[in-house]
Image (spheres, grey):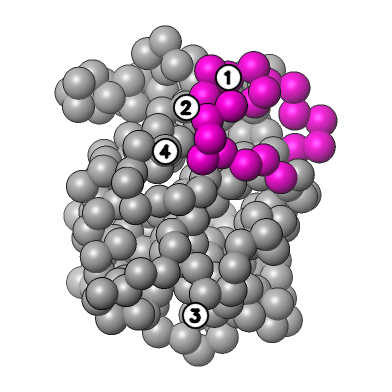
Amino acid sequence: MDVRNIVAVIPAAGIGKRVGANIPKQYLLLRDKTIIEHSLTPFLEHPDIQRVIVSVAHNDQWFTHLSLANHPKIEVVQGGAERVDSVMAALNIIDADDYVLVHDAARPCISSEDINKLISTVRGNLNGAILACKVRDTMKRSNSRQSIEGTVDRENLWHALTPQMFLNAQLCDAINRCQQPEKITDEASALEMAGVTVNVVEGRSDNLKVTREEDLKLAAFYLSQGE
């Protein structure tokens, strides 16, 4: 059995202006807890995850006031200007042979079942993998004038989700070798550019990322169903 340690990494240095709030979106309240508390809890409670590293902005004034900030699994590092910088700040304090699970701070509806499925898949074949859900709607490609140029075949198309799980050494190497870091939109994209195989694990479609104001109501509904 693969006995490597598993470390969760939560980049939380972003501002999230599209939500329209005057504080970073991960600190907005959602059913009496902040979004980031919902996002962190499944990893803190998971028996196979030894550490949870949170990357916060240098001027963050909210995280230390959370009830779970002093949880024994949690470690805090200073994030950077871009998501990849915040991820790397955490990866740099993780052993090369450890697995890392990178999860968005603004995905509060992640289920323990999906985390288990992802861990089991990666441990089973050593390839990195991401949670994703199949595209269900008809996909259109437009031009810069918002006119439709064509319909995109949705077969084998997936919405990428988090967490995404890789060996730390492999992920660090892919990010460090990337010639165009601005094109790293998620961790899988760094490995794709390095020519490394990344697998897809089908996850729940309710694992949404809170990006806009209307997402808050939907996330609250999903959480209420889980309770």
Q: For the magenta stretch, what is the residue range? A: 57-77
Helix or strand or loop: what does disc 1 sit on?
A: loop
Residue that appears at 48% across and 73% down = 167
Check if mark 1's residue and mark 2's residue have beta carbons within 8 Å.
yes
- Residue 219 at x, y = what percent? 34, 27
Check if mark 1's residue and mark 4's residue have beta carbons within 8 Å.
no
Separation of residues labelled 3 and 2 (CA atoms)? 31 Å
Of residue 21 and residue 108, the one placed in the foreground of this image is 108
Separation of residues labelled 1 and 3 (CA atoms)? 36 Å
Q: Amino acid at mark 3?
A: Glu
Separation of residues labelled 3 and 4 (CA atoms)? 29 Å
Of residue 114 and residue 142, the one placed in the foreground of this image is 114
Helix or strand or loop: what does disc 2 sit on?
A: helix
Of residue 95 and residue 23, the one placed in the foreground of this image is 95
Q: Amino acid at mark 4?
A: Leu
What label sits on residue 66 in the rendered view?
1
Q: Amino acid at mark 2?
A: Glu
**Picture quadrant where residue 220 is located:** top left
Taking 179 as reference, is 147 above or below it?
Answer: above
- Say whether residue 171 is visible: no
Of residue 63 and residue 105, the one placed in the foreground of this image is 63
Q: Which residue is mark 4?
A: 44
What label sits on residue 37 in the rendered view?
2
Residue that appears at 67% across and 59% down = 93
